[in-house]
Image (tube, rainbow, N blue to C red):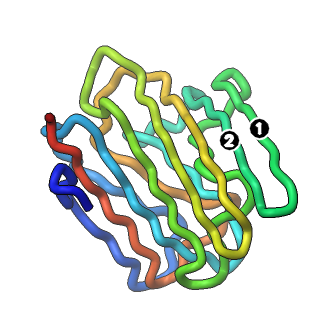
Amino acid sequence: MPTTYEPISTQTLGSAVQTVTLSSIPQTYTDLVVVVNAQSSVNSDLYVYFNASNTNLYSRTTLWGDGTSAGSSRVVHSDGYNFLVLTYYGAVTTTAGDSVHVINIMNYANTTTRKTVLARCNSASSGVDATVGVWSSTAAISSMTFDLAGTRTFSAGSTFTLYGIKAA
């Protein structure tokens, strides 16, 4: 990673869990980057919500492709989603090392702006997708919780690494 990236924490799962929370995020950086290398027992979409806020304040647009077809989807906060969907079609797969998710969160500590999220998933077996999302809250982000669709679980060995971006 460039020298502007400062590792904050890494969480490697020792057993299967339904959610992973990165908490006590310091408010001393301008932006955050999370790298998720996760596996599940059933292919699943990756979700995130901030500060334990599972209210319908999340909107997103996703572009996806699998080498044969491509598409897009759009969800606005009034649709009632209480989390931000970071992938479109089961990009957390059953194969270890098959998918990597890179999530950029801009101005996460700013208390006067809504939070913008850019997420990219690269999966060898299911394709690629890119998501731009908004959390319509001006609260600073101090924690984030990752979840999978339904009651699916992240497999042991999945990793979640959080980086802070230093101010220029």
Task: Note whether 108 is above or below 128 in the view shown.
Answer: above
- Tell me the SS state at disc 2: strand
Q: Quadrant of the N terminus?
A: bottom left
Which amino acid, by three-letter code, is at mark 1? Answer: Ser
Q: Residue at x 30, y 14 (%)?
A: 112
For residue 73, which numbered disc appears in the image?
1
Name the one closer to the observer, 103 or 142: 103
Q: Residue at x 57, y 31 (%)?
A: 58
Give the label on residue 62, or none: 2
Label drawn at residue 48: none
Q: Would you place residue 7 above or below residue 134 in this image?
A: below
Quadrant of the image occupied by residue 150 = bottom right
Amino acid type of the residue that numbered disc 2 sits on in the rendered structure: Thr
Q: Residues within 10 Å of mark 1 (few under 14, many from 20)?
A: few
Residue 69: image quadrant is bottom right
Outermost residue to the right: 68
Nearest to the observer: residue 2 or residue 144: 2
Residue 168 appears at what percent x and percent y?
14, 34
The numbered mark, 2 or 1, whose residue comes first in the sequence reads 2
Residue 46, how many percent across, how many down? 59, 57
| Residue 106 in the image, given as x and y percentages of width and height | 35, 34
Give percent across and percent down for residue 82.
Answer: 60, 37
SS type, badge 1: strand
- Judge by depth and name the residue closer to the eye, 84 or 53: 84
Q: Residue at x 71, y 64 (%)?
A: 127
Q: Are marks 2 and 1 in contact (CB under 8 Å)?
A: yes
Q: CA distance from mark 2 to mark 1?
A: 5 Å
